[in-house]
Every structure is written in structure tokens, then in C-alpha cells.
Amino acid sequence: MNLTKLNTEQQNPKTLNIDLMGTEEIVTVINQEDLLVPNAIAKEIPSISEVVDKIVQAFKNGGRLIYTGAGTSGRLGILDASECPPTYGTDPGMVIGIIAGGKEATTEAIEGAEDDGDQGKQDLIDIGLTGNDVVVGIAASGRTPYTIGALEYANEIGAVSVSVVCSKDSEMEKISAYTIAPIVGPEVVTGSTRMKAGTAQKLVLNMLTTASMIKIGKVYGNLMVDVQMTNEKLRKRAENIVKTATGASDEEARAALAEQNNHTKAAILQIMTGLKGKGVLELLEKHDGHLRDAVAAFHSSK
């Protein structure tokens, strides 16, 4: 595909003279363009919902969510994946971010990395990709060889292949089983797809993991009940979550967390049911970690 024909590479007519604008005018134009992103994503909600259901199904079957991409797109995948363990108590291997060029590419550009389709495949081989996994390829242009190589291998293995792109009728869309394509228009600075395209990708990835985690029982009401207490801020957050969910005092919340080895969800269930020790975890396990179902089942048995 001719690069100049890509939607993400067009000049934005609203910013042709941005280098002549004052500071406030520059940031105002950037803000006005950013406002276009949510509406572009809204048009993709049916596709996003479909992919979420595939991710949930994968998790239930022991599969993983794997993001793959180059440059900004790869970094966004790594960012989203890295936030899942502390926020939702997931195993680090449940949501994985892979970037062309490896870890070094998270902080600097690696020459030629995005052009290597074979490496896109090899990086998935190296993590033992299976048919139970979901592979989400991320690329604003939808034409990155590294990401295309990954998606082609995902199809070969029988994994679910998904493209998150910001271009119409892209090469990646033709390869993947599912496509999420918010069309955000030309960037304020021509071709700087870390801007609107990157924002759109970030919002889509937020939706994919957040909705999936809600559906597998990681959220009760709107509380992150599997939060990991890895620092003082998160320790306090866990205590507040227990108190909000149960109406418990500070002392009761801390005691329940201590008794349940800092397992926020289990502490809540202990307070709500009066169960102790292993009985709490057994009830949660019986209901696949869904706190609401566990509480309802306990009270219906009384």
C-alpha cells in the first residue's frame, strides 16, 4: 500500500499553519482534534464487544490475551498488559504485551524491527502460542509487517486473531478474524500516530481488558475486588474497597484482609457471610471467583 494514501498519513487541513500559531492556539487545536476520538470509538462498540466475548472465552479455557505491535502500538500493548496484575490480581502470563525489537524497544526505536514479519511469528512461537489464545495486533496504519506476521501465525495455529487499526480496509483487517478500526482522521502533526491514533488504541485496549476482567468476576459493583496490595497506596485502596463493599470498620477490614492473606475479594466474602479460613476460598472457587454469585448462593442456602 502506498504510504501517502493511508488515512493516518494525510495532512490535516486544520493544522497546515500550526507552526505559525501561538501556544494557546496550538494546544486548543490539539484538544479539538482529540475530541474526535471517542466518537470514532463509539462506532466500533459492536466489534469491541465481540472481541471481549472472545477474550473472556479464552480466559475460561485457560488461554491468554496477547498484544503485539511495533513502536507506539507495541508500547501501548505492554502498558495495558502490565496494569492487569496489580489492578485485577491476574497472573503476569495471562495478558502479555510483545513489541517488535524486544524490551529495548520500549524506550527507544529499534531500526528495522517493525519490518520483520518472520520475527512477529517467532515471538509468538517463543511464548508457546496455542489455539486457546487471543492475539491482538495493534498498528495505526494496519500494514506493519511485524504485526502481520504475528497475525498470520495466530491464524495458522487456530488462535483468535484481532486487529486494532486506524485505517480503512487495511492489510491487517484482511488477515484477522476480527477488526476494531476507529477512524480518527489525519493527525495534528502529519503521520504522528502517537497522537489521535495512539489515544484511540489506548482507549480500545482499556475497554478490552476492563470489560473482560469484569466478566470473569474481577469487579464487584464497580470495585476492583482482586486488587493486589503491592504498595501502601494499594493497601489503603484494598481496605477502602472492603469497607465500601461491606460497611465494615477500619479494624474489621484490616482484620479480614489479614486473615485472608490480603486477598481483597475473600476478605469481603468473609465479612458478608461470617465464613472463615478455607471455607471462604472454597465458596469463591465454586462460583468461579464471582463474588456476587458466591454471596447469593450463601444466603439462599440459609
Image: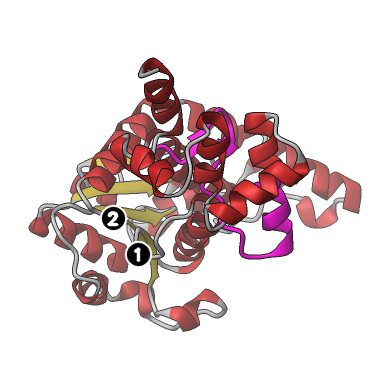
Secondary element under disc 2, as helix, strand or loop, is loop
Classify 247 as above or below 162. Answer: above
In this view of the protein, which residue sits in the foreground, 45 or 52?
Answer: 52
| 10 Å crowding of disc 1: few (<14), some (14-19), many (20+) | some
Secondary element under disc 1, as helix, strand or loop, is loop
- Specify whether residue 230 is painted magenta: yes
Mark 1 and mark 2 in contact? Answer it, CB < 8 Å.
Answer: yes
The N terminus sits in image quarter: bottom left
What residue appears at the point 32 percent right and 39 percent down from the top-left corner? 288
Residue type indicated by callout 2: Arg
- Residue 170: x percent and y percent? 30, 47
Q: List the residue tagged with mark 2.
A: 64
- Residue 96: x percent and y percent? 37, 63
Q: What segment is highlighted magenta in the picture?
A: 217-239
Residue type indicated by callout 1: Gly
Q: List the residue tagged with mark 1.
A: 93
What residue appears at the point 68 percent right and 56 percent down from the top-left corner? 235
Left or right: 221 in relation to 49: right
Classify 15 as above or below 148. Answer: above
The C terminus sits in image quarter: top left
- Specify whether residue 30 is painted magenta: no
What residue appears at the point 52 percent right and 52 percent down from the top-left corner? 260
